[in-house]
Amino acid sequence: MSDVPFLHTDELSAGYGATVVLDGVEVALSPGEILTVIAPNGMGKSTLLKTLIRQLPALSGAVYLDGLSLTSYTERELAKKSAAVLTGRPEPEKMTCEEVVSAGRYPYTGRLGILSAADIQAVEEAMELVHVLPLRERDFNRLSDGQRQRVLLARAIAQNPKLLVMDEPTSFLDIRHKLEFLHLLKNLVREKQIAAVLSMHELDLAQKFSDTVLCLRDGHVDRFGTPEEIFSGGYIEQLFQVEYGSYDGRFGSLEPPHISGSPQVFVIGGGGTGIPVYRALNRKGIPFAAGVLQENDLEYPVAAALASVVVSEHAFEPVGEEAVEKAKAILLACREVICPLPGFGSDNRRNEELLILARENNLLKT
Amino acid sequence: MNPSQRKHYTACFAFLLLLLVLFLAVNLLTGSTAIPPREVFRALFGAGGADTARSIVRNIRLPRLLSALILGGALSVAGFQLQTFFANPIAGPFVLGISSGSKLVVALVMIACLRFGMAVSSGMLIAAAFLGAMLCMGIILLAAGRVRNMAVLIVCGVMIGYICTAVTDILVTFADDSNIVNLHNWSMGSFSGIGWSGVRTASVTVAFAMACAVFLAKPMGAYQLGEDYARSMGVEIRRFRISLILLSSLLSACVTAFSGPISFVGVAVPHLMKNLFRTAKPLIMIPACFLGGGVFCLFCDLVARTLFAPAELSISSVTAVFGVPVVLSMLLSRKRR
């Protein structure tokens, strides 16, 4: 392996005609890696992807593929090196899946486009790899979204590319097919040593399947790094300018904004039992308090996002005096107390005092 | 292409060839003058035979059925190309107004030539028809660039067709020449009045365009997945689009130059062929549409000549009668899906 990456850009400007959408883009990607582009809507994800495969000309700067500037490739040479799965959904008339995949052999066939034995084998292999061989005779237009996307991936694979560019390949898939598709892609990229660039709106999946992540914002690359670098320190909230609600980069979970106001309900939760209660209260628009929760409790992030007040204890410490007293004060100001916990353990023993207090004051809702 | 597909395609081609031979024979044998089959055979291959029979078969029936075959085929292929280009199953030379544009310019050239006493060569007719086709195509492409809606595009084409037909009618009405009858017949659409020289020019032009069409089959196949995919597979999109437009214009211009505008063949035949062959693969569809269009026009011409003989119907009315139901059924079945 040389030090020069397989795909890299140099001061790349991308856009349409005179309109520059992105400026000064510097990315690099090696074979066997997945680079995911994430950005708020309208920040040029598609524009960048189209420029990487020369569907749009670079406005300035250059894209280098396998050491050569993209402009020096002929159409056919480029098609042998790069393939795409695009956002538009093709609706070819009376085409079987096998014929759609066969279309990927375009740069390899002769003037009339007749498939050789080697082409037929490549098509079969591609379909096998993506598990669509049983669909070969089916009408492409009658597939489900998940099947269609896999067939389009097989088509791209049949093109035998070294660079695979995919614009929001998982957008229309359900969770099962999103996972399946990305898992398939990950294996494929490793096995065939393909460099893959994709754009995605599913941040949680981008975090889990990408080797590098490129973040676009306001016409430039805002950050470019590993998922560990990108999905930490509240950066995602900042990138997407999340104003209402919050995004937890560790789990990839979105939470709506908390209901502000003095708490009307006190929840004695822990270990995840409180999460459904918090969500229900949030939905109904009732401000509530939660506690006492250790900061390493499973439900602490949800409580922190949704409760107007969280009474917390330091991580890995048993619930202590100070926290309990604070919680008691808040609890007594509430009109209702909910305790989804089935029982208490040594670490949250003192929360039982809260329960007893609630019972004594007839605040406990059963 | 798997073995079962190959078998199916072979069977379909055999079927079309059989129909072709059948209609060629029936067209040769029928006409306003009754000629016994033996005489027809002798007129074709023998040296002797009655002079009138020989002249009717050789100079009237033969060129006419060859025109129907060649021009019908050309029209269907042009239709298939336009449908692929616009990704629109009801696009065709007639529907998009391209035939009418050709008709207008050809009528202009004819009237001018008649007025100044010049002979009109078939080459000139094709050139004029091509010019008219390109003008209308230019307008359609402008419209297509502006609106992506396929219904609007068709409406534009129909409107252009109306305007061109209206202007042609006015021209024909005020053209003061004894040849006005011919001009009128032609502007309604007919395979009569195409002599051997016309057949020769038409067949050379169509053969050239068909050869080019076969070499465009590969990018056409890729283009069926959409322009962006085609480009990502290495199609030089600009060159391909220009070639396809030029070819389909040339094919439909050639038809209009010789037989006047013929309606609905370019939409109905490709649709019938796609259903018969169960594919839209260009390499199969191009020869299939050619054969199918030839058979369809031979059949329609037969009806035009014989249904109310000795009066003759315009070919366009017959193709409309048989073509429109096909187009309608296609539109309705698409809606259901």
Image: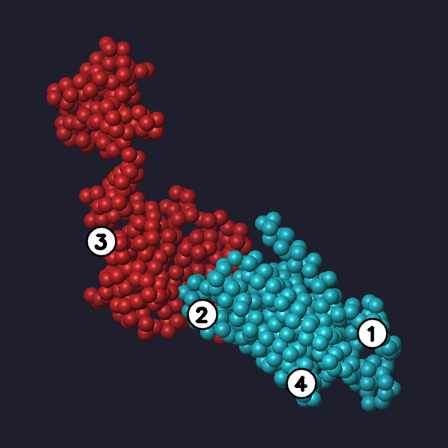
Chain colours: A red, B cyan
Residue that badge 2 annotates:
B237
**Residue sitting nearer the eye, B137 or A83:** B137
Give me the disc on residue B141. none
Image marks 4 and 1: residues in contact by CB distance under 8 Å:
no
Q: Residue at x 28, y 25 (%)?
A: A287
- Residue A223's disc is 3
**Residue mark closest to the camera, 4 vs 1:** 4
Which residue is pictured at 25% across the width and 33% down the height? A305
Residue at mark 4: chain = B
**Distance between the alpha carbons at the discs numbered 3 and 4:** 72 Å
Residue in front for this viewpoint, B98 or B67: B98
Residue B269 in view: no
Chain ID at mark 1: B
Q: For marks 2 and 4, give the CA distance.
A: 40 Å
Q: Could you tell me the amino acid type at mark 1?
A: Thr
Residue at the disc numbered 1 = B30
Residue tagged 4: B113
Identity of the residue drawn at 61% across and 63% down: B158
- Give the CA separation, mark 4 to mark 1: 35 Å
Please state, as top left, top right, bottom left or bottom right, where the N terminus of chain B lies in the image: bottom right
User: Could you tell me residue B126's position as x and y percent?
Assistant: 62, 80
The secondary structure type at the circle numbered 4 is helix
- A288 left or right, relative to B168: left
**Quarter occupied by residue A320:** top left
User: Mark 2 or mark 4: which is in front?
Assistant: 4
